[in-house]
Amino acid sequence: MAVGIVLRSVLLALLLALPATVRAEAWLIDVQGAIGPATADHMARGLEEAGAAGAELVILRIDTPGGLDNAMRQMIQAILAADLPVVAHVAPSGARAASAGTYLLYAAHVAAMAPATNLGAATPVQMGSPGLPSLPDEPAAEEDAQETDEPLPGTAMERKMVNDAIAYIQGLAQLRGRNGEWAARSVREGASLPAEDALAKGVIDLIASDTDDLLQQLDGREVRMGDTSIRLATDGMTLRTHELDWRSEFLGVITNPNVAYILMLVGIYGLLIEFYNPGIGLPGVLGAISLLLALYAFQALPVSYAGVALIALGILMMVSEAMAPSFGVLGVGGIVAFTVGSIMLMDTNVPAYQIALPTILAVAAFSAGLLVFALGMLMRARHQAVVSGMEHLHGAPGTVETISRDGHPMVRVEGELWQAVSAQSLAPGDKVVVVDLNGLVLTVNKNGA
């Protein structure tokens, strides 16, 4: 028995002495749909969590039409600051990395695309107007394309935006050793490339049909990390998908321009109802919460302050019309200002971050209907008989209750007992009509007199 105990002890010591085998892990982060605050937050926190978890690699699976410039730059800063390799993969087949997606592809340590995908059209989206630099009628071959000193077409602001975007993407191209000349064309001319052409022109590093194929091709590849180079060992690497959490989902909901727009209006109307009917509580609480959420969303969105001012002016004019009617002048002006401000609210040409026109029209129609309803209630109130104050006593019938010792009659009118005077002689039980009021003394006439 002693021998068995010794053998078990030796085996246990040998097992403890063996090095622990931990399989390397790669994190997969999806960048899908229009790039905005929620996308940037999800990707940036994913990179942080991957580094904290000891991941060897992060793969960004990209399929985007583009998005907001601020969100894109936040994502690129997170990639450049990452302490582990970041691989951008445009996938699956049929996906695209347009506009902001092209910048992400250039920023990654390794750029890959699946077959039948494309990238490019990186002109700033705020410039999507008729004055934008566009493709020339007879574009020169890319091999002959050279930088010129000729000024770009468009206004000074447009040229500044295009030049800034060109310098930004060329800086990324120089950092990663990719085709900076085509990157400039992508911004200046809105050029695009399919996957095979992008590989041939040195825009991307490889073509991989899916994530497994990508990991196989990455095995043994050297990646530059700062001043050092590391060799990727992706053979047998496990893959972990970084799912959207509640925070990213919530941020994605409230930064939807249509939702933020509705939250703002609920907040404004809720506070107005509470101010005009103090003590209710619910409209004020709901309005304050909605307005704060809308303001949080607006600070992350490209909001036009002129649009916000026009919306506030429109609501103020409609409320003023309801409180002090001006024969519709304030009301119509308020509706026009409200509608124009709503259209101008989002200062971007990115379709995913513009307020839907049907939503604007529906809210404007609701506001107009609310104004008409308030005006109708006010007009009906004006035509109703006065039921409060002293004026309504003129012409009111009454009955003489008693005659005081000094000879003044006491008259009951609408259930109340009043001191009265009259030119006729009155007796208890006589029916009278109020003809005047002097302080708290009624002047009455006997019925039929």
Image (cartoon, rainbow, N blue to C red):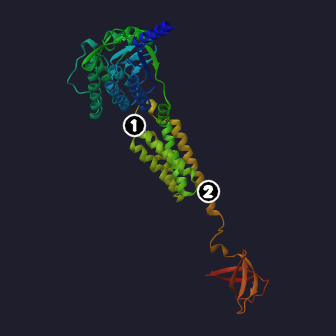
- The amino acid beneath tag 2 is Met
Which image quarter: residue 393? bottom right
Image position, residue 437 (x, y; %): 63, 80
Q: Which residue is mark 2?
A: 377
> Which percent across, then down, holds residue 392?
65, 72
Position of 80 with respect to 62 (left or right) is left
Residue 55 relative to residue 279: left or right = left
Which residue is found at the position 28% from the left and 26% from the top?
168
- Residues 66 and 436: in front is 66
Of callouts 2 and 1, which one flags the residue occurring earlier in the amino acid sequence? 1
Give the vertical position of 74 relative to 204 (above or below): below
Residue furthest out toward the front? 2
Q: Is residue 208 visible?
A: no
The circle drawn on residue 74 is none
Let me know if residue 172 appears in the view.
Answer: yes
Q: Circle 1 sits on which residue? A: 302
Instruction: Looking at the picture, tell me which residue is in the foreground, 15 or 303.
Output: 15
Callout 2: SS: helix
Query: Disc count in the image?
Result: 2
Label 1 element class: loop
Q: Residue at x 44, y 41 (%)?
A: 296
